[in-house]
Amino acid sequence: MTLVLTVLRATPSLNDFANRYTAAPWKYRDTRRLWHRLVGEALLEARVAYREPLRWPRPPRDHVVVQVTRYAAAHQWLDPDNLTGGLKPVLDALKSHDVIADDTAKAIDLVARQDVSPHRQPTRWTEIRLSLDPPSTWVQRQDAEDEEDAFRARGGR
């Protein structure tokens, strides 16, 4: 079972709301409210597209794989720590809409990715893919990327 949500906004950076020098104290609250609304709209669009009733089932108690892909131009990519930390309001929104039971490591397996937007003009958007049983291609692709990163870290080109 897989649910795909499309949000027409890129996930925020951790620096947007966690930097104590540049972020206002209410910045995270506003970001959390924005993503709550955006995820709610994406859930409604997904339900209409799948022709499902608008009543949501209870969140699955099984381990859920949450793959969040942030699409943006290559010069707008985030550092890995900013990418992962910026997903907090997204996960909070999924939890508040009862899509996931909890946002702990026991309840979800989080995969954060960045990719260049496939459109001609560089647009910024986010794809959230929730799955109860991860396809083997995710694992194979992640393993291949980890091997490539390890090769580059050893000095390979």
Image (cartoon, rainbow, N blue to C red):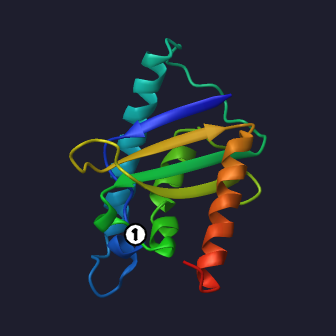
Residue position for label 1: 78
Image location (x, y in percent) of residue 71: 38, 51
Q: Is residue 2 above or below residue 119?
A: above
Image location (x, y in percent) of residue 75: 29, 67
Q: Is residue 84 above or below residue 25?
A: above
- Visible residue check, residue 88: yes
- Tell me what residue is drawn at x 24 percent, y 51 percent: 122
- Tell me what residue is drawn at x 56 percent, y 40 percent: 129
Image location (x, y in percent) of residue 26: 31, 69
**Quadrant occupied by the C terminus:** bottom right
Quarter of the image holding residue 76?
A: bottom left
**Secondary element at tag 1:** loop
Image position of 28 (left or right of 92): left
Q: Is residue 54 above or below residue 32?
A: above
Label 1: few (<14), some (14–19) or many (≥20) C-alpha neighbours in 10 Å: some
- Visible residue check, residue 102: no
